[in-house]
């Protein structure tokens, strides 16, 4: 299935027209990178990312807008479905590891946690509401995740001052109370967390 999805992406006329220098799919057990012309149209890119998220086994998909994984500042268009669970985590570093989220489509809640797993703060970003917040910066070391009751697309800026992205160390710490993505407890935890956020 994964190979079929990748081939569909490469054959898509929109991909050929405006694909980034690197495109990465977050498909299960697949690290796919493609080279292509510079992006010229942003809206169709969001459309394609959202479509790919719908068929991705992990219910999310991103386009990497930076030139390579070693860059200190990395930019991604990240499309996520409501069924995609991102385990609460934090980035621990002596350097700046802030993440900046800007909502492009739909809405989401960024959730910041206390050390014991209780919700400390929730921040809603909404693309449609003209009065809603659009951007939020997650500070280095904050335990966080994102949740939503619908699909969304964000522009994500990530600081990697220590030599770029490394998938083995990017999410440096998962608290003990944070179920792993493939854990049997993950779906129930996510449902309960979303409900708590909606009522918080």
Image: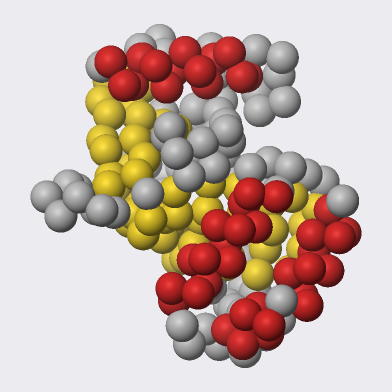
Quick check: can you spot residue 127? yes
- The image quadrant that residue 32 belongs to is bottom right
Question: Who is closer to the viewer here, 119 or 192?
Answer: 192
149 up-or-down from 128: above or below? above
Q: How is the image coloured?
A: secondary structure
Image quadrant holding the C terminus, namely top left
Residue at the (15%, 55%) spot, across then down: 130
Quick check: can you spot residue 21? no
126 up-or-down from 76: above or below? above
Q: Is residue 54 left or right of residue 44?
A: right
Q: Is residue 25 left or right of residue 135?
A: right
Could you tell me residue 44's position as x and y percent? Answer: 50, 74
- The image quadrant that residue 36 belongs to is bottom right
Residue at the (34%, 28%) spot, across then down: 112
Residue at the (40%, 10%) spot, across then down: 116
Q: Residue furthest left?
A: 131
Could you tell me residue 113's position as x and y percent? Answer: 36, 22
Question: Who is closer to the viewer here, 186 or 51?
Answer: 51
52 up-or-down from 10: above or below? above
Could you tell me residue 57's position as x and y percent? Answer: 74, 42
Residue at the (78%, 77%) spot, across then down: 11
Could you tell me residue 85's position as x and y percent? Answer: 57, 31
Tally of numbered discs: 0
């Amino acid at each position: 299935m994964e190979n079929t999805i990748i081939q569909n992406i490469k054959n898509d006329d929109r991909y050929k027209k405006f694909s980034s220098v690197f495109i990465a799919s977050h498909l299960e057990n697949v690290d796919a990178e493609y080279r292509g012309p510079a992006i010229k149209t942003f809206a169709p890119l969001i459309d394609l990312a959202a479509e790919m998220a719908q068929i991705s086994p992990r219910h999310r998909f991103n386009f990497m807008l930076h030139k390579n994984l070693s860059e200190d500042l990395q930019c991604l268009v990240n499309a996520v479905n409501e069924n995609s669970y991102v385990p609460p985590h934090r980035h621990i570093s002596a350097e700046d590891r802030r993440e900046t989220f800007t909502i492009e489509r739909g809405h989401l809640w960024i959730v910041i946690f206390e050390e014991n797993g209780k919700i400390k703060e929730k921040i809603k970003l909404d693309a449609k509401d003209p009065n809603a917040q659009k951007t939020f910066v997650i500070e280095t070391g904050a335990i966080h995740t994102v949740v939503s009751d619908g699909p969304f697309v964000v522009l994500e800026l990530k600081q990697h001052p220590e030599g770029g992205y490394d998938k083995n160390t990017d999410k440096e710490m998962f608290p003990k109370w944070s179920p792993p993505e493939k854990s049997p407890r993950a779906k129930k935890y996510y449902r309960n967390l979303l409900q708590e956020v909606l009522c918080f």
